[in-house]
Image (cartoon, grey):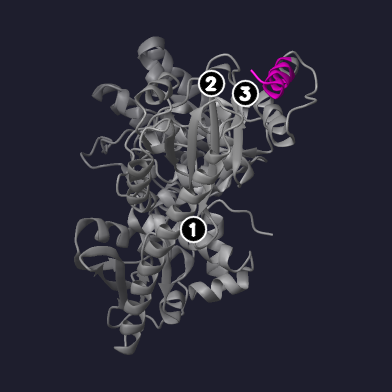
């Protein structure tokens, strides 16, 4: 061990004992402090595993021939090459040295494992991502004991928009004097970056050619889209208001995933109808995106007119048209009829019922859970409800009414009908099986309203997440991950995840690593639709190219500035 290596080892031991680093390089000392702040283990690493790496990802396709060539030329020289995504997840690994591969396996440095700094401490992958530039970590400079056997050089790889696309890490057995590894890492990463830029540029040129060709053919209301860019005709950007655009985006996403060429009608709020046609675009047999054309059906209102907005009920979050319509129907009906609010667990049935109570004027609020009748007994349960309704009228909500027996439902319905006649607003909640409450005259006495699940209004996820985070800011990558989730537990599941993340995070900003592990793992298994990816990517592309100038970014995208602001908000980005 050299004098330098012994000095670093002693410095690390002193730091772990609580002293200030003295001889460690500034980048390393700062990284150690970050790891200590994040409670990263210095004794044992256990990186998270995120499988289902996309073998056709642009970075992998760009890197594959480069890594093949370098490994063939270098042979067994004791080097390994780790390619990672922007989050530090290893997506490819190469080495011709069997012994080195065995060492890497022992510390889980293999495809699918995440080597972000907050996972395994100071290392060539995570620390280079944190700093955004080349980083070398030698032996005892690693925060974790298990990684001190390596020397690692990590070099970030950026795209044409200067956004991080991934990272190349070159690793060997710990050797402070090995300077060649720096050169190999830099040159290999640069070559991969050049190939990636060439790939991106070719796709962008091909898409722009398609856009210009469509313009020359007289198309007016259309846009060209890929997973990296969005080019919109001015008229298409102004044809719809924000609510209508959200509904259209969801519709087109389904079209693109179901067929190479599809045409269908889409009814918007207020009865307005669009004819939507999407067509897959190819360049040399490779799919590069799609062209989407929209037209108003004959007899509809003139373009540019904004349809009346339905305001959300008090205390509720979300602007999805189907959600707003359902909530509005609950509030409008509760004033004069019994309403049964149905939907999946966690969708917010009770919250909607309470919001309808506030919307209709408030007053007394009685909430009783029908699932407790089996414990309390029918007579006592109904007697208590009757006693609660013997007062100033307001709203009564019977939760889980579908859990009652048919005879109990008849009794509760009769009591609610009696209360309604006395001026009470009567609501009930039930599961996904739509209920028709019985009545003495054989007719349905209640109006049934079904709330859409969160998976059908995924565009509301950013607003809901920010609401649940309260005063804490969510990093853009957190919102992007949340948009990839199917949310089987609906709003309740989203709320629980955000509250856990807020409780875990020690920063003002909640980051991906603060989210529950099971959420981060499952998010990798659901790929965003082509349109969802483009919505998120196009915003960042334009903002990066215009250095944050929103007016210029809107002009670049061919949309109004107000539309850009809406998209920024939907992506979880702060607006200043």
Name which residue lies at 33% across and 89% down.
216
Q: Is residue 539 above or below residue 121?
A: below
Residue denoted by label 2 = 149
Residue that badge 1 annotates = 159
Q: Secondary structure at mark 2?
A: loop
Q: Relative to 266, is 205 on the left or the right?
A: right
Span of residues in magenta: 1-13
Mark toward the start of the polypeptide (3 vs 1): 3
Helix, strand or loop at label 1? It is loop
Q: Quadrant of the C terminus?
A: bottom right
Residue under numbered circle 3: 143
**Residue 334: assigned label:** none
Q: Badge 3: how crowded within 10 Å, few (<14), some, or many (20+)?
A: many
Residue 90: % across, % down? 42, 36
Q: Residues within 10 Å of mark 1 (few under 14, many from 20)?
A: some
Q: Relative to residue 519, is residue 387 depicted above or below?
A: above
Separation (CA) of disc 1 from disc 2 = 32 Å
Q: Are marks 3 and 1 in contact (CB under 8 Å)?
A: no
Residue 460 position, x and y percent, is 47, 50
Residue at image point 47% right, 40% down: 353
State the image quarter where residue 179 is shown: top right
């Amino acid at each position: 061990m050299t004098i330098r290596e012994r000095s670093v080892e002693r410095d690390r031991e002193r730091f772990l004992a609580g002293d200030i680093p003295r001889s460690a390089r500034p980048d390393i000392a700062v990284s150690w402090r970050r790891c200590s702040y994040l409670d990263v283990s210095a004794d044992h690493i256990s990186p998270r595993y995120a499988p289902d790496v996309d073998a056709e990802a642009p970075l992998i396709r760009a890197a594959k021939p480069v890594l093949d060539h370098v490994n063939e030329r270098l042979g067994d020289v004791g080097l390994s090459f780790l390619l990672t995504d922007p989050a530090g997840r290893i997506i490819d690994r190469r080495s011709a040295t069997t012994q080195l591969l065995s060492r890497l396996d022992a510390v889980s440095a293999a495809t699918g494992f995440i080597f972000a700094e907050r996972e395994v401490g100071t290392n060539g992958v995570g620390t280079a991502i944190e700093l955004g530039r080349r980083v070398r970590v030698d032996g005892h400079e690693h925060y974790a004991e298990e990684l001190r056997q390596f020397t690692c050089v990590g070099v970030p790889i950026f795209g044409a928009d200067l956004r991080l696309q991934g990272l190349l890490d070159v690793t060997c057995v710990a050797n402070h004097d090995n300077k060649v590894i720096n050169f190999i890492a830099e040159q290999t990463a640069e070559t991969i970056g050049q190939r990636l830029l060439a790939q991106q540029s070719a796709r962008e040129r091909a898409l722009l050619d398609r856009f210009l060709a469509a313009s020359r053919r007289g198309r007016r209301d259309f846009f060209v889209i890929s997973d990296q860019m969005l080019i919109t005709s001015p008229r298409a950007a102004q044809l719809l208001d924000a609510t209508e655009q959200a509904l259209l985006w969801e519709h087109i996403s389904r079209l693109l995933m179901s067929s190479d060429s599809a045409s269908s009608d889409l009814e918007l709020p207020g009865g307005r109808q669009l004819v939507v046609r999407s067509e897959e675009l190819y360049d040399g047999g490779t799919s590069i995106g799609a062209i989407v054309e929209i037209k108003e059906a004959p007899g509809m209102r003139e373009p540019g007119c904004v349809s009346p907005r339905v305001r959300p009920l008090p205390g509720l979050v979300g602007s999805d048209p189907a959600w707003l319509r359902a909530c509005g129907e609950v509030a409008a009906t509760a004033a004069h009829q019994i309403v049964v609010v149905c939907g999946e667990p966690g969708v917010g049935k009770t919250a909607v019922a309470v919001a309808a109570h506030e919307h209709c004027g408030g007053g007394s609020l009685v909430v009783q859970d029908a699932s407790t009748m089996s414990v309390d007994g029918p007579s006592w349960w109904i007697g208590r409800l009757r006693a609660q309704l013997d007062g100033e009228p307001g709203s009564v909500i019977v939760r889980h009414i579908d859990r009652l027996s048919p005879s109990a439902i008849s009794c509760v319905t009769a009591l609610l009908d009696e209360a309604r006649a006395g001026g009470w607003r009567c609501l009930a909640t039930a599961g996904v099986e739509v209920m028709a409450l019985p009545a003495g005259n054989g007719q349905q006495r209640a109006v049934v309203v079904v709330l859409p699940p969160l998976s059908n209004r995924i565009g509301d996820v950013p607003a809901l997440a920010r609401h649940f985070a309260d005063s804490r800011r969510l990093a853009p990558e957190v919102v992007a991950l949340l948009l990839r989730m199917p949310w089987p537990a609906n709003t309740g599941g989203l709320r629980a995840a955000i509250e856990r993340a807020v409780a875990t995070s020690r920063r003002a900003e909640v980051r991906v690593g603060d989210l529950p592990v099971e959420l981060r793992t499952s998010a990798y298994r659901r790929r965003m639709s082509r349109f969802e990816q483009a919505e998120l990517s196009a915003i960042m592309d334009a903002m990066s190219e215009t250095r944050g100038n929103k007016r210029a970014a809107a002009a670049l995208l061919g949309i109004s500035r107000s539309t850009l602001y809406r998209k920024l908000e939907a992506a979880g980005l702060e607006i200043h």
